Amino acid sequence: MFDRNIYNKRVQWFTNARFGMFIHWGLYAIPARGEWVRSIEQIPLEDYEPLKYEFQPDSCDMRTWAKSAKEAGMQYAVLTAKHHDGYCLFDTKYTDFSSKVCCGRDFVAEFLEAFRAEGIRVGLYYSLLDWHHPDYPHYGDKIHPMRLDPKYSNENRCFDRYLKYMHGQIKELCTNYGKLDIMWFDFSYDNMTCDTWRAQELVEMVRTYQPDIILNNRLEVSGEGLGSLVTAHPTDYCGDFVSPEQLIPPKGIFGETGERAVWEACVTMNGNWGYCAADHNYKPADMIIKKLVECVSKGGNMILNVGPDARGKIPEESCAILHEVGRWMSRNRASLIGCGCAELDKPEYGRITASRDGKRLYYHVMEPQIGYVYLPGIRREQVESIRLLRDGSELRVDEGWITSNYRDLVFVSFGASPLLPDPIDTVVEVRLK
Ligand code: GLC
């Protein structure tokens, strides 16, 4: 039975954390054409499986990954423990198709240790699909690499045996690695959803071993679809947040009864989740910053993806973007971490975020203004202080003749320069009485 009070307590840290790192990594880093390469190119297992011997990431040091995330201001991180290709980055008794067997390393354990050491909350992504397991539907499936080849008929496949495998591995992850903060399932499609996964039983098991863990909504849907979380009758396996993919919801996400839903936009830095050597279409740091602000201003989170290469290095372009995002976050994180929607109209020049108690408003000025910057939604008598967040300097409410037609409104100035103190996003902090 869904208990709204228990739910609100469980998701509180997540709705304050606001910014996470997604890490997609595995054998698919060797073909280096994205994590769907087996499905898109219909690669037979006998051509893909041998990669498990080649995958020996000699440059993989999760501590450097964790430091990059910390510097960027990321509060949580999620690693693909098993993606659709079925390769397991953890020690599992259910298969030899794992990093523990093939390269002697339990990367999930290394990830958890490195990121916990940086004080970053940790989560694991687990693919409900499995293109390696013989009992997962092949021929006729919507996306299986062998979906079009009748030689891969499903007559001798036992899906219950696959579910035993899947539930067993998820239990391993929930019982062998200490406290997990997030389990990020992926993904439901067509009839492969809800009861097909035996979702009720699965979530009861997960919450038994990890009572405080939060789940996404993909036991019911995928990046498209909201799931029953936003309805008046959520299931026990609806998850704890909606997971829009490669899109920021136009107005945020709301439940049927009008309350804001908890959501996290998952976003790639280039166009691929898994390493893709030819994809240099990286989103610039200033865009990432503005999109993160947009998510928070709409009451949501952003989880930003990195796809390390086959040797275990995060691509240099990604590292540079994380470094630049971190520079901005080092001065302005108070306007995002622990904040949410201000429930005020969006100003023409940018966005507004607010502390959860509403006592602090953050005006994100992304376009230079003529003369003065108007701070909508507040009256002068409400204001305790106004500061330029980046350096804590005082900003005084203008009392001059230029704004004299608007004496009940609040205008501030950044000084003589027509340019913004921070060209990406200059943040004004208003503390209310
Ligand atoms: C989609 C993709 C999957 C990726 C996920 C991240 O489900 O299929 O490859 O891991 O998005 O949200």
Image (cartoon, grey):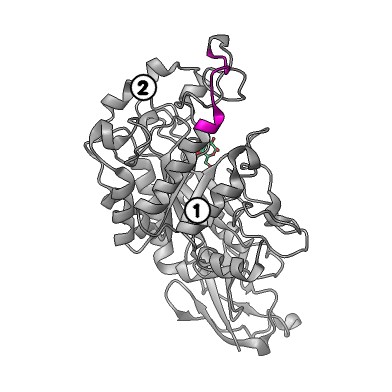
Image-quadrant location for residue 240: bottom right
Label 2 Cα crowd, 10 Å radius (few <14 / some 14-19 / many 20+): some
Q: Position of residue 237 (x, y in %)?
A: 62, 51
Image quadrant containing the N terminus: bottom right
159 within the magenta span: yes
- The mark nearer the N terminus, 1 or 2, is 2
Expressed as whole percent of the image width and height from the top left, the position of residue 348 reads 68, 62
Give residue 206's mark: 1
Q: Is residue 306 visible?
A: no
Q: Position of residue 146 (x, y in %)?
A: 53, 17
Could you tell me which secondary element the residue under label 1 belongs to? helix
Q: Is residue 413 above or below residue 41?
A: below
- Front-lying residue, 186 or 345: 186
Q: Foreground: 14 or 220?
A: 220
Would you say residue 244 sits in the magenta stretch? no
Q: Which residues are magenta?
A: 152-161
The residue located at (49%, 64%) in the rendering is 17
Residue, x 72% and y 59% (percent of image)?
254
Residue at 76% across, 63% down: 258
316 or 195, which lies in front? 195
Res. 116 mark? none
The residue under label 2 is 49
Extreme-top residue of the structure: 151
Q: Is residue 61 left or right of residue 92?
A: left
Q: Is residue 354 left or right of residue 402?
A: left
Total labels: the figure holds: 2
Left or right relative to 8: residue 276: left
Does residue 2 show up? Answer: yes
